[in-house]
Image (cartoon, grey):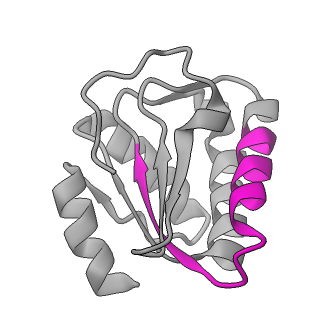
Amino acid sequence: MSAKNSLPENLPLEKRFSYDAKLNRFYVNFQNLKIDNINDIYRIEYLVAQHLSELGKKVSAIVNYENFLIDEELLVPYSRMVNRLMEHFYAGVTRYTSSDHLKEDLEKGFKGANIAPNIFGTIVEAETALQDIS
């Protein structure tokens, strides 16, 4: 799966996840997604679990955070949710965004939850790094 340049902001959350069985790789596309309430976080966790729980193995994951927005007060619960997903489903995960501001916010939130940020500027960098950590 390659990154798309522009996804509609109203793309349903259910359509933002895909699994490549050949690579054992899970793609999460949060491009143009805004998280502004705790229910969004619960819904993400539910949908990821729904996709991955029956595989019986951990997967590598790449998360696209281009133009992603999250309210600052939700960074801690979001990071905790990411930590749970990593413990249960991910063998390794990388993330990418071209936004330095978002990188800083996510790094701060993830480090507070003892998560290695692994945030890169492009999908190519994220894919290369994922090979080293998974």
Of residues 115 and 34, the one drawn nearer to the viewer in this rendering = 34
Question: Residue 52: where, in percent of width, then height?
Answer: 69, 66
Please provide the residue range marked out in magenta. Answer: 41-64
Say left or right for 56 vs 103.
right
Q: Quadrant of residue 35?
A: top right
Count numbered badges in the picture.
0
Q: Any magenta on residue 49?
A: yes
> Where is 100 relative to 117, above or below?
above
Give me the residue at 53% from left, 51% from top: 18
Question: Residue 96: where, in percent of width, then height?
Answer: 31, 50
Say left or right for 14 vs 63.
right
Question: Residue 115: where, in percent of width, then height?
Answer: 53, 69
Question: Residue 46: where, in percent of width, then height?
Answer: 80, 50
> Where is 122 relative to 116, above or below?
above
> Where is 77 relative to 125, above or below?
above
Give me the residue at 29% from left, 41% from top: 3
Q: Quadrant of residue 59?
A: bottom right
Q: Any magenta on residue 132?
A: no
Give me the residue at 30% from left, 22% from top: 6
